[in-house]
Amino acid sequence: MFKWVASLLCGLLATGLVSAQAAEAVPASGTVAIVSDAWEDYTGADGTGLGWDLMRTIFEPAGYEVVWRIEPYLRSVGLVQRGEADAWVGSYKDEQDCLYPRWHYDTDHIYALSLARLPAPTPTSLGDYRLAWVRGYEFQRYLPSAKQYEEIHRRDGILEMLKRGRADYYIDAEQEMDYIQQQAPDPMAYKMTHLIDLPLYLGFTNSERGRELRDVFDRRMDELVANGQLRAIYKRWKMPYPFEREPTKHTDGRADRAHR
């Protein structure tokens, strides 16, 4: 009898704990829970950076408190897809199964890093070389000529990988490349070659709440780009301003941004 009561109590307590944890995992009303990898001067772990300033400028005047969280990129995507966060930072269009807005909020300038003696690659010549990039970035979607590539878990050791010939080119965004090259004992032994520009989007959770926040994002971006308010944020962080034209409409009702 006592064992049965104890088991029942333990079960109820466990159920209550699980329910409480589930409740905590759901973003609170009146907030927008945005998750991102930590990028210096962009989405800092202390809440500073261009990305966080943009998110606050977009959402807070519309009545949503921005609740930010730092997680590795793939975990960020998973949290949003499970509804434990509202959006993640740094997605490329249609990269994942989620809701995408009309507007992007920035542009990734994608480069190839290599030893200086190697020829400068082009988007069409990449199929002749061994490539590497961080797992989850899915650059093969945007560089269809890429055939031989390795997805790595960390950026540590990139320079050594290139030096030892384990890859011909490492592909990443410009800011990451600058940091990696600066770590080299002889930076002039390496070179960066521009490949493509990719608009950056928020990926929203596929739910009624996600649709609401996506639409708020697009309405606010319509206003902010029209009045030029975002220019000051990019200038403050010494980043190029990516919005010279409004997004162009497509026949399927979606929109995209022309590259600068």
Image (cartoon, rainbow, N blue to C red):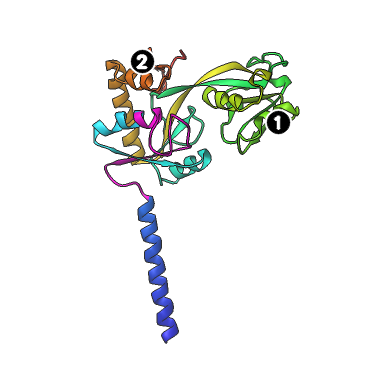
Q: How crowded is mark 1: few (under 14 residues within 10 Å), some or many (20 or more)?
A: some
Q: Mark 2 points at which residue?
A: 246
Residue 127 lies left or right of residue 42; in this view the side is right
- Taking the view exactly as shown, the residue that stands out farthest to the front is 185
Q: Give SS at disc 1.
A: helix
Q: Where's residue 20, x and y in %?
A: 36, 59
Distance CA(mark 1)–CA(mark 2): 41 Å
Q: Where's residue 188, x and y in %?
A: 65, 17
The residue drawn where x is 73% and y is 15% is: 117
- In the rendered image, residue 119 lying in the magenta stretch gets the answer no
Q: Where's residue 122, x and y in %?
A: 64, 14
User: Is residue 172 shown to the viewer in this render?
Assistant: no
Q: Give SS at disc 2.
A: loop
Q: In this view, does 120 lie above or below 133?
A: above
Secondary structure, magenta segment, majority class: loop
Q: Where's residue 49, x and y in %?
A: 40, 30
Tell me where the magenta segment starts and ends, as one range: 26-53
Q: What's the residue type where badge 1 is placed?
A: Met
Name the disc covering residue 233, or none. none
